[in-house]
């Protein structure tokens, strides 16, 4: 059994250095007329970019978000929050961050007094999302949190309530809403180009044996691969069909109980939708799969590989999806900055993250009930 992990112990040992894999989709029925949502609207003349502070300087913040912020037009990296002092000098030098914009987890709340920072992006282990998103809102900052939004429906609701009370916007890091292959899948499914979608298959797994990683801790991660990467498969079905699932059934499996002592190694689940469509899914830390596939009466569409940061390849029964690579995170963050300046609700709002968490909780209820169908 792994040794207990608490937030204090985790921060002391690692400084929250890992941000987790970040992938996902868009809320149902937001795509209209096949518009190319990946295209930016330019920063209005005389408007300054919004300042972004990254909270947690782990793998995702270091290798994806910080580089993506060098490509954004409407926002820029202006601050960091880390529990690892050794990282500070490197980040300050590489991204020209002044010392006054550097915080740790004890000084975090002082960010309220910093006009250089408009947006706080929480890139911490899942169980810490709610705390820091709420504290950021209370500091008067706009909030992005990585997926999953939190580890419970109640925490998602608390985050939404805190942001509403503070009058700030809340978004979830569902970058695939800005990836053109996934946008095309939304269009094909939601506009019923091949007729109503009847079946979706969505699977995302990778092989991991690093049991020291926070994702292997139920306390820190909230439930293993389902919250880590399985959430992308949930999103894929929801935004392809354009509806919310009404019931699910699921099973959890461990072939290596010596390694997977706190979480399921593999989870399989099915979902049913109001119009009669069904979806089937798997996620695992002991397999490699990365696929989104949909069938309809007059055609089919597939993205494989599907859910990573780049490299998507798409096909329909009519031919290949031929889209250029985009930096998903840059488009995601620019769109949130646009929503702030134009006072719009993000298409990947807190409500979108809450919908996924309701499905996730239903999946675990089904596992606990021996794989019976349960309502979402």
Image (tube, rainbow, N blue to C red):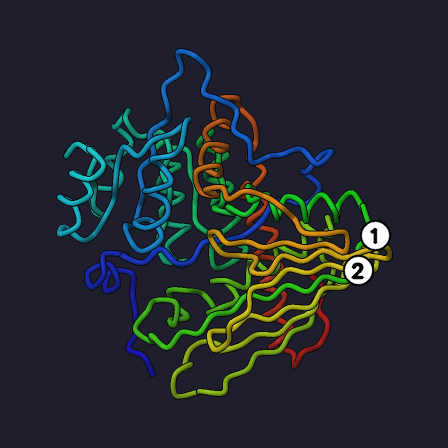
Residue drawn at x 49%, y 26% as measured from the top left: 338
Element type at marker 2?
A: loop
Q: Is residue 265 left or right of residue 109?
A: right
Q: Are marks 1 and 2 in contact (CB under 8 Å)?
A: yes
As displayed, is residue 174 above or below residue 271? above
* Circle 1 SS class: loop
Quadrant where the C terminus is found in the figure: bottom right
The residue under label 2 is 277
Q: Position of residue 71 (x, y in %)?
A: 38, 34
User: What residue is shown with label 1?
Assistant: 196
Q: Is residue 257 left or right of residue 35?
A: left
Q: Measure how far apart labels 1 and 2 are at the Cα level.
A: 8 Å
Counting residues from the start of the chain, the first of labels 1 and 2 encountered is 1
Q: Is residue 292 above or below residue 85?
A: below
Residue 322: x and y in percent read: 62, 46
Q: Residues within 10 Å of mark 2 (few under 14, many from 20)?
A: some
Indicate the quadrant where residue 127 lies. Answer: bottom left
Q: Residues within 10 Å of mark 1 (few under 14, many from 20)?
A: some
């Amino acid at each position: 059994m792994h040794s207990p992990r608490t937030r204090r112990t985790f921060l002391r040992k690692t400084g929250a250095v890992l941000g987790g894999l970040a992938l996902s989709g868009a809320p149902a029925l937001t795509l209209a007329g096949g518009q190319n949502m990946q295209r930016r609207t330019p920063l209005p003349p005389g408007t300054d970019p919004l300042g972004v502070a990254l909270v947690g300087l782990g793998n995702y913040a270091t290798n994806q978000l910080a580089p993506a912020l060098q490509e954004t037009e409407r926002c820029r990296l202006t601050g960091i929050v880390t529990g690892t002092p050794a990282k500070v000098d490197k980040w300050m030098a590489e991204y020209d961050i002044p010392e006054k914009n550097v915080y740790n987890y004890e000084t975090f709340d002082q960010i309220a007094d910093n006009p250089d920072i408009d947006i706080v992006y929480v890139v911490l282990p899942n169980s810490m999302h709610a705390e820091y998103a709420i504290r950021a809102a209370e500091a008067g900052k706009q909030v992005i949190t990585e997926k999953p939004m939190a580890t419970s429906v109640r925490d998602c609701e608390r985050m939404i309530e805190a942001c509403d009370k503070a009058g700030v916007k809340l978004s979830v890091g569902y970058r695939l809403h800005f990836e053109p292959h996934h946008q095309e899948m939304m269009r094909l499914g939601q506009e019923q180009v091949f007729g109503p979608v009847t079946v979706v298959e969505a699977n995302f797994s990778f092989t991991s044996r690093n049991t020291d990683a926070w994702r292997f801790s139920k306390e820190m991660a909230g439930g293993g691969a389902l919250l880590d990467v399985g959430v992308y498969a949930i999103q894929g079905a929801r935004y392809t069909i354009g509806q919310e699932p009404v019931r699910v059934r699921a099973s959890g499996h461990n072939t290596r109980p010596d390694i997977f002592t706190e979480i399921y190694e593999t989870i399989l689940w099915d979902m049913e939708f109001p119009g009669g469509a069904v979806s089937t899914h798997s996620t695992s830390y002991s397999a490699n799969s990365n696929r989104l596939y949909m069938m309809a009466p007059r055609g089919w569409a597939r993205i494989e590989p599907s859910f990573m940061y780049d490299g998507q390849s798409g096909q329909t029964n009519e031919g290949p999806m031929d889209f250029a690579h985009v930096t998903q995170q840059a488009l995601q963050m620019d769109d949130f900055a646009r929503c702030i300046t134009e006072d719009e609700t993000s298409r990947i709002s807190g409500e979108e993250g809450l919908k996924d968490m309701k499905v996730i909780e239903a999946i675990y209820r089904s596992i606990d009930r021996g794989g019976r169908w349960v309502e979402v």
